[in-house]
Image (cartoon, helix red, strand yellow):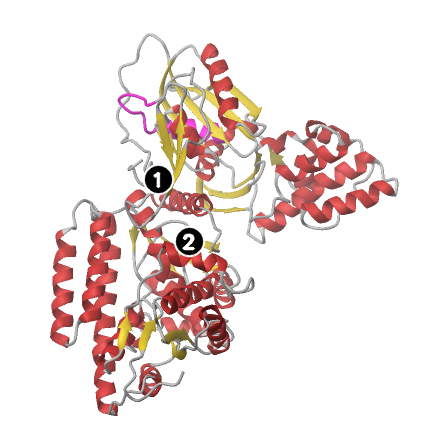
Amino acid sequence: MALGSNASVKAYISYMREYSLLWHHIAQGIDLDVIPPRPPDRQTVDVAKECGFDYWCYDLRLILADLLIGAKDGGQLLIVPGGHGTCMLGHATAAMMKPMIESSFEKEVKWLIVNINPAVMFRTAFASLLKEAKLLCKLSNRSAMPHKLIKLIIEGLEKVKAYAKLHEFVVEHLHVMNDYDGAMSILRDTYDKLLKSRSRAEIASSYEEAISKAKGMVCGDKANISVSIIGDFYTTMLSSFPVFDLLRFLASQLGVRVVWVMDWWSFINPFGELWGNGNYRKAMQILGQRVTGSDIITVSAALRARRKDVDGLIHLSVFGCTPEATAVGAIDFFKEKYGLPPICSITFDEHTQPDAVKVRIEAFIDTLAFKKYKSVSVHGGQRQKAVEAQHRSNHRDMLLGIDVGSISAKVVILDADSKAVVYKAYERTHGNPIETLRKMLADAGRECKGKIVSVGVTGSGRELIGAFVGADLIRNEVTAHAVAVRHYIPHARTVFEIGGQDSKLILLQDGIPVSFSMNTVCAAGTGAFLDHQAARLGIPVEMFGEIARRAKKKVKVGGRCTVFAESDIILRQQAGQPIEELIAGLCYALVRNYFANVVSGRAIQPPYVLCGGVAANIAIKEAFEEMLTCEVYVPEHFNVMGAIGAALLAAEAIPQRTSFRGFELPSLEAITTTFECNGCSNRCLIRCFKTTYGKEMCIGSLCQRW
């Protein structure tokens, strides 16, 4: 771009959280026309889904999306985050974005890559900043003496420090603030004020005013559970997460205290807590030769969180991120040696759905509560405060538990006093869970001889089903199964739960769930694996167990996914392999794939318990026992354990008056409307259903707005 000495260059700064404030201040100081940086929003996320290459990680696409929006708004000089190392977020890949943007808008843009690799000491970082500030002057045809640039950098770092301190205070007190949106607005308003601040006095004034407002919002009791969120770059996206606002979910919905351990000020302050107390040195020792700065910082943050005595860690990483994959391995390997708290690792991409994250987070918080208090903590947006059960009537009081999964629905009725199962039903939904449940509840109503005082719902369809039946408590399936197993087999240590589309591993200690894992996107270790083969073979899946037991030997089915397994089965059928040997091989393959995808090297101990509809297959039980060389228990109510757990949890939250709509429920029509709620930063996708009597029912909201 040929620009004269007096030409005006419009600069756009890619969002780098607090670091954006520094570069905005430098650009302002040399009289550039600056488009203010802004956090990624729904527009950025939508653009990111469609741009970049398939092998790019999500944060890289977010950066490109941010720059495309900036160029569309008139940016001619783009200030881009980069850094050294093997990570794609470096100079090489950042440079690839330039021709992509230029071809999109058919215009030339200028390009400044600023080093955001934090794994350097202050002196090196400051020298790099000065060098990049000089290059900014050159690219924008501006002139500034070195002492002026140094002054601008120091003032910009004051902004970084002020916002980092404010951000940490607000995040750590969100659980005791009754106005989440108000707290977030303080951060947004202060960010905008700091962007415009021209002096240290203005910076200090903006900070003090914001802190005073934030302190005025603090009220209520302290949370029982505290967690820290780690994952270098990905912690910048918490208020615009690919699926929902994670901070809101943790602090406002679950009442969890978030202890902040990741901030840019620590990165550029050699005396900051992230570097201090030996955290950085230990992280270097753990990882050995450094790959990039990101993995070092993530491990350092985990060590800092340990010193703050948090109950657990949530590690965020995007699919395909090499540094975070290194950090995951290091943290997991050295967890016991360095006394790290329990860790929930969540790998996501731009297509991650809310439930995929919510179930894991909620179940993780439950395991922390179990571990800390030896009892279940009833929480969630749908809960009601536990109260003493009302005066018993002439009829027995009953608890209703419902578990609706991907392919089946389960209904149980428990006696409220003895917790004995007085009724249970298990049915395949055949793609219509609502209608199936309606019929099941009608049947249950005819058998129920008492009064329903509390209703618990779990399963992958729990949100819709809970709203439909009028649940008093809605809880994730991990916690529900753990509670049910603890009730029937208190000495159990390991729970294998295999459902239609997902599988779970739950580790118990003294009846307390201390860890869990769920299958990835692969369904090879789930009931769907056998269902698919049963449909192709024309044999009811219910007969697989008995047929497999007739086999003299089992065929080793190749491949660890349904596609390769099916190809192998077809070839063996064509070769004349007996059908019973093929089915025995399929059952063994399911268990092998379950161990590969779900157990995945975790330390498991007997007694072992097998739950889920697949447990009806005797060949599956025997395959587990063959692999473990140990007996595996199958509970009497193995296929309805989730529903039993939901009912047991509902017993701890008996309301003054149940919300249950009754056993005779009306039909539910198709979705009438779908819209995105603009009430807060969550931007929830709300789906509205209508009943036959005209009542509208909305689901999808993380708060109680809908």
In which quadrant of the rendered view does residue 537 lie?
A: top right
**Amino acid marked by disc 1:** Ser
Taking the view exactly as shown, the residue that stands out farthest to the right is 576
* Number of the label disc, if any, that sits on residue 642: none
| Left-right relation of 577 to 630 | right
Q: Are marks 2 and 1 in contact (CB under 8 Å)?
A: no
The amino acid type, in three-letter code, at marker 2 is Pro
Relative depth, front residue between 46 and 503: 46
Q: How many badges with numbers are in the image? A: 2
Magenta highlight on residue 594: no
- Identify the residue position indicated by label 2 in the image: 242
Q: Residue at x 62, y 48 (%)?
A: 595
Task: Report helix, strand or loop for mark 1.
Answer: loop
Residue pushed farthest top? 394
Q: Is residue 132 above or below residue 166?
A: below
Count residues near mark 2 (Cα–Cα under 10 Å), then give few for <14, some for 14-19, many for 20+: many
Decide: is 667 above or below 30: above
Q: Position of residue 80 (x, y in %)?
A: 39, 74
Q: Is residue 668 found left or right of 222 in the rendered image?
A: right
Pick the quarter of the image with the N terminus. Answer: bottom left
* Quarter of the image where the C terminus is located: top left
- Residue in the picture at 61% in, 44% down: 523
Q: Give the spatial CA distance, label 2 vs label 1.
A: 15 Å
> Mark 2 or mark 1, which has the lower sequence index?
2
Please give the name of the residue rendered at 22% of the width and 70% of the height, measured from the top-left corner. 195
Q: Nearer the viewer, residue 311 or 11?
A: 11
Q: Position of residue 457 (x, y in %)?
A: 42, 30
Magenta part of the protein: which range? 642-659
> Looking at the image, which residue is at 43% across and 38% down?
476
Residue occupied by mark 1: 701
The crowding category of the residue bearing disc 1, from other C-alpha atoms within 10 Å (few below 14, some 14 to 19, many at least 20), is some
